[in-house]
Amino acid sequence: MQQQSGNEFTPGQVVTMTPRLRRITGNNPGIMTGPGTNTYLVGHDRIAVIDPGVEDERHVQRVAEIGNGRIEWIIVTHAHPDHSPASRALKQLTGAPILAYPHTLEGIRDKAFSADQPLHDGDVLDTQEFTLRALHTPGHAADHLAFVLEEDGLLLAGDQVMDGATVVIAPPDGDMAAYLASLRRLREMDLRAIAPAHGRLLDSPQAVLDQIIAHRLAREDMVLTAVCDTGIHDIAGIVSHIYTDVPEILHPVAAGSVHAHLIKLRDEGRVCEKNGRWLATQTRKQSI
């Protein structure tokens, strides 16, 4: 896998990741998107574009230019506003169909998004140049897909994994139990690297996935401790209590993850919810 030096996320710059994979980062940097949304071009003779990104005419034109008339598929990992809106303009330029998992999101979403063809778990795009296998990885969003570029052992992770940041898990479309299950599924795969939708190529994928799982479980234990041992029973209070290492501007985002943890704990019978208050269903065992 080719690691780049310098400012590899300059909008419009083409970064070669492997002989089969190129990346162009959109001009939408931010606190939730890092350097911007990565658009990936898989293949050269027959090209699949993954995550065209936000509505940005210059970015779409650049992707189409690099595609050079050979874009045959436009793939969206999930219908969030930083991933899917540009799919419509790219389709107009190229005539390529839009492919995505067939599920409509309920919360934050690209409301105008519509796919031409469904992609399901295990579906494969197979050309003489590459084999791209779809994995349904719900958790961050119910419609989330990741992809394995099999010749390179590379996971195109969408928002399942981010470089240097924690993925938002916010109900109703975010599901913490599903997210952890998706991570564990990926952990069992023979991967050589992870290409996230935001940030750098990540080596040592098993270690990366282990770290994310451990972080989520540690946060979950903090949520449960807050409910059981501190007398804090509302989401805002839990966030203020345990997210002391996170700027307050991100507390509304953290509230989504806390809510997702509480739903998981409720489904496991460890907490319950009454009139907006989250309560322990049993006393935690204290170590001596």
Image: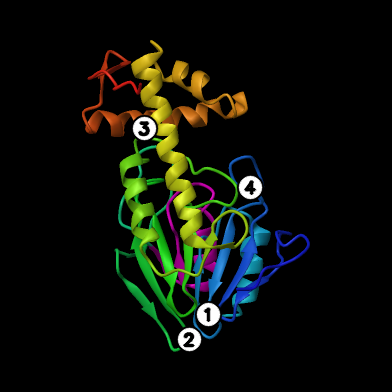
For the residues labelled 1 and 2, say whether their Cβ atoms are less than 8 Å apart: yes
From the image, tell me which residue sits under label 1. 43
- The magenta stretch is 72-99
Q: Circle 4 is placed at which residue position? A: 34
Q: Nearer the viewer, residue 135 or 82?
A: 135
Query: In the displayed structure, would residue 168 be above or below residue 46?
Result: above
Q: Quadrant of the C terminus?
A: top left
Nearer-N-terminus badge (2/3)? 2
Badge nearest the viewer, 4 or 3? 3
Q: Position of residue 215 (x, y in %)?
A: 47, 41
Q: Nearer the viewer, mark 1 or mark 3?
A: 3
* Few, some or many residues within 10 Å of mark 3 (<14, 14–19, 20+): many
Name, please, the residue furthest toward the front: 288
How far, Cα to Cα, is label 4 from label 2? 31 Å
Tell me, yes or no, whether the two marked residues, 4 and 3, touch with CB atoms within 8 Å: no
In which quarter of the view is residue 286 placed?
top left
- Identify the mark nearer the N-term, 1 or 2: 1
Kind of residue sitting beneath label 1: Gly
How crowded pointer 4 is (Cα within 10 Å; few <14, some 14-19, many 20+) is rated as some
Q: Which residue is mark 2?
A: 129
* Label 4 residue SS: loop
What residue is pinned by disc 3? Answer: 261
Of the residues shown, which amino acid type is indicated by label 3?
His
Local secondary structure at mark 2: loop
Q: Say which label, 4 or 2, has the lower sequence index.
A: 4
Whether residue 110 is visible, yes or no, is no
Q: CA distance from mark 1 to mark 3?
A: 39 Å
Which numbered disc flags the more N-terminal residue, 4 or 3? 4
Report, in whole angstroms, how far the alpha carbon at label 4 lies from the one at label 3. 24 Å
| Amino acid on which disc 2 is placed | Glu
